[in-house]
Amino acid sequence: MKHFDAIIIGSGQAGVPLAKKLAQAGKKTAIIEKGNIGGTCINVGCTPTKAMVASARAVYQAKKASELGIEITDVKVNLKKIKNRKDEIVETFRASAQKGLETTKGLTVFHGEAKFSASKELTITTSAGKEEKVTADWIFINTGATTVVPDIEGLSEIDFLTSTTIQDLEDVPEHLVVVGGNYIGLEFGQMLRRFGSQVTILEKSNRIMGREDEDISNEISEIFKREEIEILTNTEIAEIKEEKKNKLILNVKSKGKNHKITCSHVLIATGRKPQTEKLGLELAGVKTDDKGNIIVSEKLETNVKGIFALGDVKGGPAFTHIAYNDYTIVYRNLIENTNYTISDRPVPYCMFTDPQLGRIGLSENEAKEKGLNYKVAKMPMSQVARAIETNETLGMMKAVVDVDTKKILGASILASEGGEIMSVLEMAVEGGITYDRIRYCVFAHPTYSESLNNLFMKIED
């Protein structure tokens, strides 16, 4: 039985850099991966989807180029070529990550599925069925999450799409029904609409993006309606039947009324769950919550000393950059003897619809729930000079500030390059820069961030 100082299960955005850094610090390290090196982000998440979003935006820009005086008479979508480009980018990123692991001294890479057989003992099963047992002083679980498949009658009988399988399509669906009106569903829904599909989005609650403020949700809904994307809220599927290939009949209940939807494809985008079921956590004594998320301390350690969980598998914010930050915290604490925790860290995120939604800090709803003394600054992108010049006037900027301290509590930036504008405000939050200083800050003209001057002028002191 081989013994290591550290073993990482999963080669996602926390696992890969952690494995390399621990090995470089002189620790005998192993990393175990059952699939492709790079985890969700590189293989089926951020990298491929944003490559495809770029193609969808190019179609959209070409079709509205006449508004800028550019006449483009024929725009054709070659989904197979889009897929090939996406695959080439993924392969480049994956190969780079794999080479980085394989060339790191003191690091062993195992290709197989890991399962606990004791507290600090793992059994690795390869695709050929061979087993090998390994032990370690430190074990880091970075196994990520997978698609939640809802219990819908008839769903298991059809070849439904997930956020992974939809990326392998080579023909544009005639009519795509998206089940779930949140980040993943909205990104794919808009993308496929721009490629030429008829798109219907079904959301069981009373509005899409329930985590966001209602005005942001409504603004996104209006933007989608402009692109002739149908959004049905308060809607659930009772049953799905396949009449013939690429003809599905959905019996739905929408706002208390029953009706049928005929479509060619169904995308399930109702959320994700942690990949913990096959880890044998009970044999290690590692505790999970009722959803299967691994319970961790503020320093990312489980209830078993020396076993840690990083990224989506522990629940909480399911973002690549959070997984990466998890790695930096555990590495610095264990190797550099620092005392970092995950409490009170900023959680920025960006939904890559067009326009993008960049978010940081508290929403207005959250500030209200906390009983804070706050004010709100709002401004439509139609009042932003840069947006007018570039013909990107859809969306809005919104910031929540503390009346007493003048600190920025949070922001929602629904705009072209909304993620980049949000990042400017995140730096302000991190640096303690108050909104009254940003109001008169000198930004380069004409930039999107310059409009933060005018945004905070909306607040009356």
Image (spheres, helix red, strand yellow):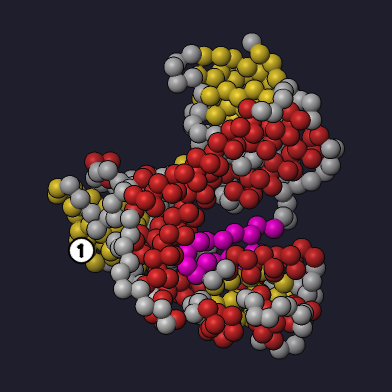
Above-or-below relation of 84 to 350: above
Q: Residue at x 73, y 78 (%)?
A: 443
Q: Residue at x 29, y 55 (%)?
A: 172
Specify whether residue 309 is in view.
Answer: no
* Image quarter in which the C terminus is found: bottom right
Residue furthest left as drawn = 243
* Image quarter in which the N terminus is found: top right
Residue furthest right as drawn = 337
Q: Residue at x 31, y 48 (%)?
A: 170
Q: Is residue 360 magenta?
A: yes
x then y, percent, for residue 447: 64, 77
Q: Nearer the viewer, residue 40 or 252?
A: 40
Above-or-below relation of 428 to 443: above
Residue at label 1? Answer: 259
Tell how many labels.
1
Type of amino acid at the residue the image marks with label 1: His
Q: Which residues are magenta?
A: 346-363
Specify whether residue 438 is in view.
Answer: yes
Looking at the image, residue 69 sits to the left or right of residue 228; the answer is right
Residue furthest bottom as drawn = 460
Q: Quadrant of residue 332?
A: top right
Disc 1 residue crowd, few under 14, some 14–19, many 20+, Cα 10 Å: few
Q: Nearer the viewer, residue 267 or 28?
A: 28
| Secondary structure state at the residue bearing disc 1 | strand
x then y, percent, for residue 364: 61, 72
x then y, percent, for residue 8: 64, 30
